[in-house]
Every structure is written in C-alpha cells, then in structure tokens.
Image (cartoon, helix red, strand yellow):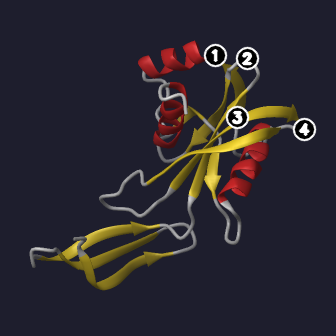
Amino acid sequence: MIPKRLSRTAIYENEWVNLYIDKVEYPNGHILDKYHVVHFDQESVSIVVQNEKGEVLLIKSNRYVTQSEEWEIPAGRVEEGEAALSAALRETLEETGYTVTSPRLIYRYHPMNGISDKVITVYKTTALKKEREYDPIEVAETKWVSKEKVLEMLAHNEIHCGVSLMGLLLVLFCEL
C-alpha cells in the first residue's frame, strides 16, 4: 500500500518549482504531520546525442547554483502542451545547434523520489546536421567526446550533473 496525503500546505509556488508540506498517513496508520514535497509542474528531458563514430556530444554549461562550469548532455524542461519528444528535439537544437535523426526513448525516472515528483525522460539520438550555433546564454561550449573519454571523465569525477550521469550511464554502460 502507498502512503496517503491527508492535507497539503503551500509554502512556495511558481511556474518552475513548488514547495509543500503534506500531512501523510502510512499504511500502518502512522501519521507524519510534516512531509516536505518539492513539486514540478513540468517534466524534463535529457538527450544523449551521438555521431556516426559513436562519439557523444557534450555541452559546457555555466551553473549559478553550484558556481561552476559543467560538462553535461542537452536537457531541459518540457513546456506546457509540448510532448517530451518534441522538447528533446527542441532542447538539442537550442543547446547544440544540431538536428537529429531516429530519437529513441531510453528511460523515464524520478531522480529524487523521496522528496520530489520530478520526472526525467531520457532519449538517445544521432546527430544529423549542424543547423545553427548553440544558444550562448545557456551553453559556453560544445564538444564531441569518444566513449573512452566519457568513461575517463566519469572515472575522474568530471561530470557532476545527475541528469547527465544517468543518461550517459544508461547509454554507455547498459547500451540501451
């Protein structure tokens, strides 16, 4: 049996993220008065883009929260009324400048299911053509990296983004 929400108090709400305190009843009857929940109205997508050589396209993002530059895979929010696949294609074009072919759903998961209902959908695709430059507000640099180099970056703790880690591990280790 799944715990049941008895009540909800909004602490903070906006179009990006919401924080609630729920009163929750567990199947054994135990009641928890303050269960903090981070809710996201929109899902997110991440995309592992490869080329004909099997190299992975990484983007370098400037991250305010962690005060760092991070190597990541393209990712972003699914806009209201947009399908996850459409968001994946849009984010890839915005963040890399590439159009892609044969996108394939790899995985769908909750990255922090103890406190959040956030959903991430991972796609794998092949780069088709560079159509334009990437968005310099979101991306500082892009580069094609061999599977071996990605594995080396992982071994040296050079990729910190959880969404990117999950996508890369699923595609490179599970070969999905």
112 left or right, relative to 46: left
Contact between labelled residues 1 and 2, with CB atoms less than 8 Å apart = yes
- Disc 1 marks which residue? 146
Q: Mark 1: which amino acid?
A: Ser
Point 9% across, 74% down: residue:
28
Contact between labelled residues 1 and 3, with CB atoms less than 8 Å apart = no
Q: Which quarter of the figure is the N terminus placed in?
A: bottom left
The circle on residue 53 is 2
Which mark is first along the chain, 3 or 2? Answer: 2
Contact between labelled residues 4 and 2, with CB atoms less than 8 Å apart = no
Residues at marks 3 and 4, CA–CA distance in whole angstroms: 18 Å
The x and y percentages for residue 56 are 66, 25
Residues at marks 2 and 1, CA–CA distance in whole angstroms: 8 Å
Q: Which quarter of the figure is the C terminus placed in?
A: top right
Element carrying mark 2: loop
The x and y percentages for residue 18 are 45, 71
Q: Mark 4: which amino acid?
A: Glu
Q: Mark 3: which amino acid?
A: Ala
164 and 127: which is toward the camera: 127
Which mark is first along the chain, 4 or 2? Answer: 2
- Disc 4 marks which residue? 131
How many residues crowd around disc 3 within 10 Å: few (fewer than 14), some, or many (20 or more)?
A: some
78 and 94: which is toward the camera: 78
Q: Is residue 35 above or below residue 87?
A: below
Residue 155 appears in the figure = yes
Task: Using the rendered view, name the quadrant where residue 79 is placed.
Answer: bottom right
Contact between labelled residues 3 and 2, with CB atoms less than 8 Å apart = no
Q: Mark 2: which amino acid?
A: Lys
Disc 3 vs disc 1: which is toward the camera? 1
